Amino acid sequence: MGKNKLSKFADMETYPHVFQVSSHEIRNGGSFHLKGQWNEAFFKNNNPIVLELGCGKGEYTVGLAALFPGKNFIGVDIKGARMWTGAKSSLEKGLTNVAFLRTNIEMIHHFFATNEVTEIWLTFPDPQMKKVTKRLTATNFMQSYQQFVKPDGVIHLKTDSNFMFTYTSLMVKENQYPVLFSSDDLYASDLNDPILQIKTYYEQQWLNRGLTIKYIKWTLEPRTNFVEPDEEIEYDSYRSFGRNQRSQPENE
């Protein structure tokens, strides 16, 4: 591991708003001390809690927190070196409505109690085109989320991936979730919302290269039975390139 990564990990150990939890401990029956106590014990208020799952560098978490001071935001990711960027930035900005949680998203229901979360943001997640159960909008994740999201809670997906957008739209339709907004070209839509002000570094790169940004949000009404879409969806061909090229349209 490089010295830069080690330095970032050491920094985060001192950050009061960063929580790094051993997956081994949780899998062996351990409990997270803030589960059910995030507002009371950490944020010290009763404001709604919003998660960004797969937050990466935390740009969106920090951006949302600055836009909406009346809500509490928690960025979740397993990559600590990336998360350091948002954690440091939020400290420098003096934002008190931000936290970061380093853990596997598959285990997210171990960290929040029933009805503790109001919204979830999924910003540019890996579409996992060959692994249905790894997609953050798959029905196994819907089942996980509804364990801690309020019955009228909202899920947001923002993506450059046509595959991910199509799959998610089908999943929402099959499970009859109420759609609050949907567009396959967000910045050409009629949406009038402060969220349009937030563009992460990679999102701006995709926009500069001619890709459209897709966005859908729906209400996570509780379900007992879940239906996975069985339609064949065309893969995103540009994602077969390396990280630096994957956002190039097919005609480039």
Image (cartoon, rainbow, N blue to C red):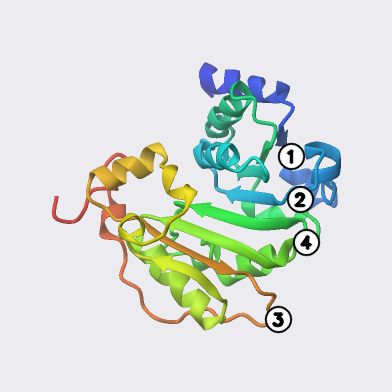
Q: How many marks?
A: 4
Q: Quadrant of the N terminus?
A: top right
Q: Residue at x 66, y 25 (%)?
A: 12
Name above or below for residue 1 compared with residue 19: above
Image x and y of residue 9, in percent: 63, 24
In contact (CB < 8 Å): disc 1 and disc 2: yes
Amino acid at circle 2: Phe
The residue carrying mark 1 is 21
Name above or below for residue 102 compared with residue 231: above
Amino acid at circle 3: Thr
Q: Earlier in the sequence, mark 1 or mark 4?
A: 1
Mark 3 lies on a secondary structure that is loop
**Left or right, 226 with reference to 240:** right
The residue carrying mark 2 is 111
**Inter-mark Cα distance, 4 to 3:** 17 Å
Q: Quadrant of residue 212?
A: bottom left
Q: Earlier in the sequence, mark 3 or mark 1?
A: 1
Mark 2 lies on a secondary structure that is loop
Of marks 2 and 4, the one in the foreground: 4
Q: Earlier in the sequence, mark 4 or mark 3?
A: 4
128 or 184, nearer to the observer: 184
Image x and y of residue 157, in percent: 49, 59
Name above or below for residue 246 compared with residue 175: above
**Inter-mark Cα distance, 2 to 3:** 22 Å
**Inter-mark Cα distance, 1 to 4:** 22 Å
